[in-house]
Image (cartoon, rainbow, N blue to C red):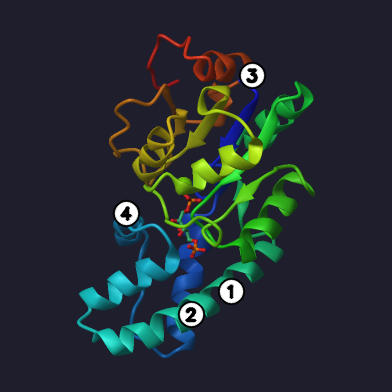
């Protein structure tokens, strides 16, 4: 295993419940819209990857016509992205416990670190820099570059292409069923670190499913990446 490709939202960063969700609601409020995404229903909306598509789908469910949706969703998402950038700059979005330690351990062992996320580059770069320091990941593939969003594998395929590695030489780390499917469709072994929103997802086929980064270390990742991990457990 020469490289680990990390997902961002819900994986490296605890970014959804108190981050993206709050930014969406602030944008709804600013545009005088009656919508609010509470904690529990937001978990269901996460099945739709990509914030703008999530908004489009929600507006359709609210009976908003196609033309109005086409005009409103990009505006809402652009403002939400600015508001999320402000949350990031204000230190309101943290790394998941154990994530920085694992990234440092991999880095010190000479394992290459990359990112493949559905999120928007406008906030991905500043968030990664704030949580892990400058230029820790290369490549950083975001929803802006990937032709399709997860569960489509394109973000991971692009990351492998830029790494110049075949899938068996890398390992994906994800938090959700959408992410696991994207990794597996790119023929990557994948470890899942579940979170409150994804604990009940279907992770069939994951090399390993754990509840926290604290259950992971370099040796475990190497075993999973080299396909030598027999056990499938929640550590
Ligand atoms: C998670 C997503 C993103 C975020 C919101 O991406 O689906 O859409 O929820 O970010 P991943 P944007 O788990 O692949 O990192 O509003 O910028 O899409
Ligand atoms: Mg995720």
For the residues labelled 2 and 1, say whether their Cβ atoms are less than 8 Å apart. yes
Mark earlier in primary sequence (2, 1): 2
Q: Earlier in the sequence, mark 1 or mark 3?
A: 1
Report which quarter residue 137 is drawn in: top right
Compared to 85, does 177 lie above or below? above
**Lateral position of residue 210 relative to residue 92, left or right:** left
Label 2 or label 4, whichever comes before in sequence order? 2
Q: Position of residue 76 (x, y in %)?
A: 46, 80
Q: How far is disc 2 from disc 1 in space, using C-alphas?
A: 7 Å
Q: Do the residues under discs 3 and 2 have CB atoms within 8 angstroms?
A: no
Instruction: Using the rendered view, name the quadrant where residue 223 is placed.
Output: top right
Camera-side residue of 66 and 18: 66
Question: Pointer 3: what residue?
Answer: 218
Q: Dividing the image into 4 quarters, which one contains the C terminus?
A: top left
* Depth check, front residue: 163 or 181: 163
Q: CA distance from mark 1 to mark 4?
A: 22 Å
Q: Is mark 1 within 8 Å of ligand 1?
A: no
Which residue in the protein does label 2 denote? Answer: 27
What element does badge 3 sit on? helix
Q: Is mark 3 within 8 Å of ligand 2?
A: no
Secondary structure under tag 1 reads: helix
User: Is any atom of residue 37 visible in this view?
Assistant: no
| On-image quarter of the N terminus | top right
Q: Is 168 rendered above or below residue 4?
A: above
């Amino acid at each position: 295993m020469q490289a680990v490709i990390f997902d961002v939202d819900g994986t490296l960063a605890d970014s959804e419940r108190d981050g993206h969700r709050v930014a969406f609601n602030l944008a709804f409020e600013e545009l005088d819209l009656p919508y609010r995404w509470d904690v529990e229903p937001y978990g269901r909306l996460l099945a739709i990857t990509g914030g703008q598509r999530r908004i489009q789908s929600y507006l359709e469910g609210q009976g908003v016509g196609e033309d109005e949706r086409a005009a409103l969703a990009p505006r809402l998402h652009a403002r939400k992205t600015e508001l999320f950038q402000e949350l990031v700059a204000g230190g309101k979005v943290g790394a998941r416990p154990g994530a920085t330690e694992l990234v440092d351990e991999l880095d010190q062992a000479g394992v290459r670190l990359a990112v493949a996320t559905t999120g928007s580059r406008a906030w991905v770069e500043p968030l990664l820099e704030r949580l892990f320091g400058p230029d820790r990941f290369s490549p950083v593939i975001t929803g802006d570059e990937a032709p399709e969003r997860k569960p489509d594998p394109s973000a991971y395929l692009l990351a492998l292409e830029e790494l110049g590695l075949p899938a068996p030489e890398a390992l994906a780390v994800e938090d959700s069923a959408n992410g696991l499917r994207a990794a597996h469709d790119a023929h990557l072994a994948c470890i899942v670190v579940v979170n409150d929103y994804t604990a009940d997802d279907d992770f069939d086929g994951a090399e390993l499913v754990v509840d926290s980064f604290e259950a992971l270390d370099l040796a475990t990742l190497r075993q999973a990446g080299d396909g030598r991990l027999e056990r499938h457990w929640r550590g």
